[in-house]
Image (tube, rainbow, N blue to C red):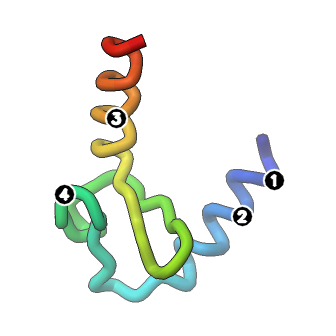
Amino acid sequence: MLELNEAINQLREREPEDVCCSFCGKPQSAVGMLVPGPNSVYICDLCVTRAARLISTRS
């Protein structure tokens, strides 16, 4: 798990300031964390939480 956290931190250090969540559109400054994906797609911690709740209610 430590390796994953280190990788995320390295990616976050390289992110430009104007990156936004690809799902809700909130800027990096308005969320706790943006997780990078392929092709310049990002998802924020809030959208991850919402998605997890949605998945758990439909399982």
Residue hosting label 2 = 7
Dot 3 alpha-carbon crowd within 10 angstroms: few under 14, some 14 to 19, many 20 or more: few
Q: Amino acid at mark 1?
A: Glu
Q: Nearer the viewer, residue 1 or 48?
A: 48
C-alpha separation, residue under disc 3 versus residue under disc 2: 23 Å
Looking at the image, the residue that sits furthest to the front is 58
C-alpha separation, residue under disc 3 versus residue under disc 4: 12 Å
Q: Which mark is residue 52?
A: none
Q: Amino acid at mark 2?
A: Ala
Q: Amino acid at mark 3?
A: Ala
Task: Tell me if residue 24 comes above or below residue 41 in the rendering.
Answer: above
Q: Where's residue 36, x and y in %?
A: 51, 67
First in sequence, mark 1 or 4: give its number: 1
Q: Where's residue 44, x and y in %?
A: 35, 54
Q: Which mark is residue 51?
A: 3
Task: Tell me if residue 23 comes above or below residue 58 in the rendering.
Answer: below
Residue hosting label 4 = 24
Question: Residue at point 29% right, 66% down?
Answer: 22
* Helix, strand or loop for disc 3: helix
First in sequence, mark 2 or 4: give its number: 2
Report which quarter residue 58 is drawn in. top left
Which-is-in-front pick, marks 2 and 4? 4
> Would residue 7 appear left or right of 41 to someone viewing this image?
right
* Helix, strand or loop for disc 4: loop
Residues at marks 1 and 2 touching, judged by CB atoms closer than 8 Å: yes
Residues at marks 2 and 4 touching, judged by CB atoms closer than 8 Å: no
Residue hosting label 1 = 3
